[in-house]
């Protein structure tokens, strides 16, 4: 017999962070690995989070004039051949459709038949196919800007997969815009990064560092890749979203041309930007604890669960009525544009019931027994409280304060993540110290966010990556100009950059 | 030079119905064919309609306890091999992924590489892959019912494609449920058909006939396929949605077993049900006219367009302010759970501006010039009015009545379609008459809905299909029991069934 653990999740974060992560997902019933290589099944509790993400971000996109559209799943091979740099960075590992039917193999099985004259690639991203459409739609500067987004599935053949973080098929949104001027395209790039920042910080309660990627870490074919980077509990970084200024590169590849106001034919300036189900992986790793998932209320599929306690069978009706009354009162309220959602769980399964909801990360649990009803109170536990303390609270007061309680949980999760990041971010100017820190880092204590000087050479960047598996996550926008020496080669440098191990 | 047409769309419905259909889509800017074989690009005006469909149906599904989830795009070949009947009917024409990377072909191009040990099929529908999950999730009757839906893309390799109606890739929802009892699964099958009926009639303003398919027209592997059938303006039928009772067939194929309350291991009973972007094709063909798209207000991306009329440049500011005020006043109102959406189009492009909105099918157009502002009135045209008459109406009255006006347009479109169907539905008992009607039918006048007796034999069904390209669309639920003789073989029959040519 295995020893009974004191935590709901085994192993704990400290014991084995990657295994803990998988276990949190399993115990919360969010998703599972499918028998299809590298693909996962997103179960209702996980998909509802993605629906909330889609719903909230979509409204933010639309407020800036972006419209949704839908482009084909398949990209002709010849389109990728036109974008050499892009393919080199991206499309080498992809799903290739070569046949369009099945026929009997003569042994009771099936085999591919109907070979295509040109293979089709399952989109790893849609720049090339959307570029082709934009080229057809753009004649004059009056046709610009084109501001499009699509919510879609994409496929990148991954060798090592991890649910939400890296799967061969994943869900995302990809925005694609075309503009008449360079400055307008650059503004759009930043505007979308601002939206990502606001959403990730406000709704997912994940503080992020904003900056631009180094040349070697850019999206293949981009002139500039901006990003937001979050710190996980194991001190690794996770890139939570990227917004690319593509210059005229894709416009030239796809022939997106227009007549400007002066009548001169010129190439458009394009951008692309995306976030994916990967964000959910980040959210899990930032907030969850050794008892399982912890959900920020703004993104939780449900906010409150009511657990009726039946001491005697004859109490059942009274208690269920009281529970339903509480649910109805709470569901009349709004929390950040959504109705408050309340579950009643009256299953008779003992302690597994309450622990089930702890592991699912629901923000507030309410126990409601005969005595609570007598006293017109409820017994409340907040999921952001790691010791799982419960408190008795007046029923009407609870109903009145529910939005404040949820806001307070949201804030406490965000603040906790900010503090954790602050405690694990250092400026280092000594190479030995830098190397020592990362060399001894592993498991749950996987280093830190290090702000160090870098001379700007790819050689130094590459050396640190090779020696320590540490990359420059970004050149933070708010990193001030200051004199210093490169952490690797000791040459002069004018700015610190953000180093970390990364997912 | 081509002769100037009196209609905004050339050709008209009477002249060439299929070409008219393509032209309506093009002129409304809903979608276009993509360079990828059989796939279309859904442009913002078309995709916004799909978003409205998703939003409204999704809420209806969820009210019945259905939850959304997401399953892999790819299905291993071996899964399909287990479902012989299903594959025979479905999966023969499908996209087959055989490789997982690209490499240089040595001539500057790319070629597929990394052959998969087992080919993967791009899902044509997800019964087999979802069945695999359900089998893992189901142990006891307590695990049932499982009520799932997914919004997804699917691929069926079609030889002849037509935008929205038949494309190789299309968007749809597919619901999949598993139940402990046969009766519960049958109830669910009908419940979902009820939802489809309500949505299609109330929101798309398309009257439908509800019934069940004959054995030969069933979904491959189903015990019963129920459907809704709508009449297009050319008198052909379009299947707008199907709900299948799958019996225990897929449960046996996928091994979805559970212990029932008596402790006996038994197979679950499953259902599946789906509607797709095809509905949009139906909506176009039911309501649109020779001036282009006509949109039912409940599904329209925008309800009202305001067209400011500037007689003099100095009017511009006053008129734009007045237009904005009107927009703001209208957008404070709700129409069937959505905010009323108003566009202001101040482009200086002459008559093309108004006609552009006619062709886009926006329900209400408002012209607003200096005289209207003086008189505190607006000049209104309703898109359901085929003669495009405009009327002057008091501004406040218009604001007060906007939801009534939209409701009235919605009703008029529905009623018009009901009348058209009534006028083109006949009971025929004479075989010669039946044959004559369909033999002379073509183009815009493609026959009728014929209610005739049928003996129930596949032979007669097949003969009529072969002779006339006419199929039994369904055995309507409301077709009364009555004595008669089969329209084909003259054998006794107890019920009339619905014959038609179909899309």
Image (cartoon, coloured by chain):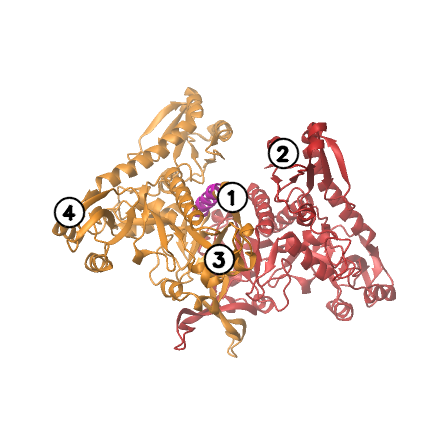
Chain colours: A red, B orange
Query: Percent x, y for residue B473?
Result: 28, 51
Query: Most extreme residue toward the front, as rendered?
Result: B262
Disc 4 marks which residue?
B429
Query: Percent x, y for residue A206?
Result: 71, 48
> In the shown orientation, is residue A7 left or right of residue A241?
right
Start and end of the magenta stretch? B45-60
Disc 1 marks which residue?
B65
In the rendered image, residue B406 lying in the magenta stretch gets the answer no
Q: CA distance from mark 4 to mark 2?
A: 65 Å
Q: CA distance from mark 1 to mark 4?
A: 45 Å
Foreground residue among B495 and B55: B495
Q: Residues within 10 Å of mark 2 (few under 14, many from 20)?
A: few
- Which label sits on residue A314? 2
Q: CA distance from mark 1 to mark 3?
A: 24 Å
The nearer-to-camera label among 4 and 2 is 2
Tell which subunit mark 2 falls on: A
Q: CA distance from mark 3 to mark 4?
A: 47 Å
Q: CA distance from mark 2 to mark 1?
A: 28 Å
């Amino acid at each position: 017999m295995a020893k009974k653990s004191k935590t709901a999740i085994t192993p704990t974060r400290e014991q084995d962070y990657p295994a803990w992560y998988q276990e949190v997902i399993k115990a919360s019933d969010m998703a599972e690995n499918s028998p299809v290589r590298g693909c996962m099944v997103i179960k209702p509790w996980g998909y509802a989070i993605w629906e909330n993400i889609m719903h909230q971000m979509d409204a933010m996109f639309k407020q800036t004039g972006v419209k949704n559209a839908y482009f084909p799943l398949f990209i002709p091979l010849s389109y990728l051949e036109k974008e050499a740099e892009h393919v080199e960075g991206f499309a080498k590992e992809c799903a290739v459709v070569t046949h369009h039917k099945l026929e009997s193999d003569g042994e009771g099985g099936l085999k591919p038949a109907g070979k295509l004259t040109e293979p089709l690639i399952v989109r790893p991203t849609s720049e090339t196919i959307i570029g082709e459409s934009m080229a057809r739609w753009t004649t004059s500067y009056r046709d610009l800007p084109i501001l499009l987004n699509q919510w879609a599935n994409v496929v990148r053949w991954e060798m090592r997969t991890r649910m939400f973080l890296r799967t061969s098929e994943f869900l995302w949104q990809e925005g694609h815009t075309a503009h008449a001027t360079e400055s307008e395209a650059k503004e759009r790039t930043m505007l979308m990064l601002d939206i990502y920042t606001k959403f990730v910080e406000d709704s997912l309660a994940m503080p992020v560092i904003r900056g631009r990627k180094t040349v070697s870490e850019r999206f293949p074919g981009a002139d500039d890749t901006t990003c937001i980077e979050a710190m996980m509990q194991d001190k690794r970084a996770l890139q939570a979203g990227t917004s690319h200024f593509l210059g005229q590169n894709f416009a030239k590849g796809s022939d997106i041309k227009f007549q400007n106001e002066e009548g001169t034919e010129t190439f458009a300036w394009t951008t692309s930007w995306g976030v994916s189900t990967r964000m959910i992986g980040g959210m899990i790793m930032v907030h969850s604890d050794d008892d399982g998932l912890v959900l920020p209320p703004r993104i939780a599929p449900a906010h409150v669960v009511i657990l009726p306690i039946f001491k005697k069978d004859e109490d059942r009706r009274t208690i269920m009525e009281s529970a339903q009354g509480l649910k109805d009162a709470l569901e009349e309220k709004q929390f950040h544009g959504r109705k408050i959602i309340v579950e009643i769980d009256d299953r008779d399964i003992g302690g597994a019931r309450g622990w089930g909801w702890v592991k699912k990360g629901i923000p507030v649990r309410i126990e409601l027994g005969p005595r609570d009803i007598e006293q017109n109170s409820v017994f409340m536990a907040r999921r952001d409280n790691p010791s799982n303390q419960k408190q008795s609270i007046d029923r009407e007061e609870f109903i009145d304060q529910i939005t404040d309680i949820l806001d307070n949980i949201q804030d406490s999760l965000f603040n906790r993540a900010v503090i954790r990041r602050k405690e694990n971010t250092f400026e280092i100017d000594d190479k030995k110290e830098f190397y020592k820190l990362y060399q001894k880092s592993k498991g749950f204590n996987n280093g830190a966010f290090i702000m160090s000087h870098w001379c700007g050479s790819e050689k130094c960047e590459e050396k640190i990556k090779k020696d320590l598996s540490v990359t420059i996550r970004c050149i933070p926008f708010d990193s001030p100009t200051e004199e210093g020496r490169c952490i690797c080669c000791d040459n002069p440098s004018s700015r610190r950059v953000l180093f970390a191990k990364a997912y």
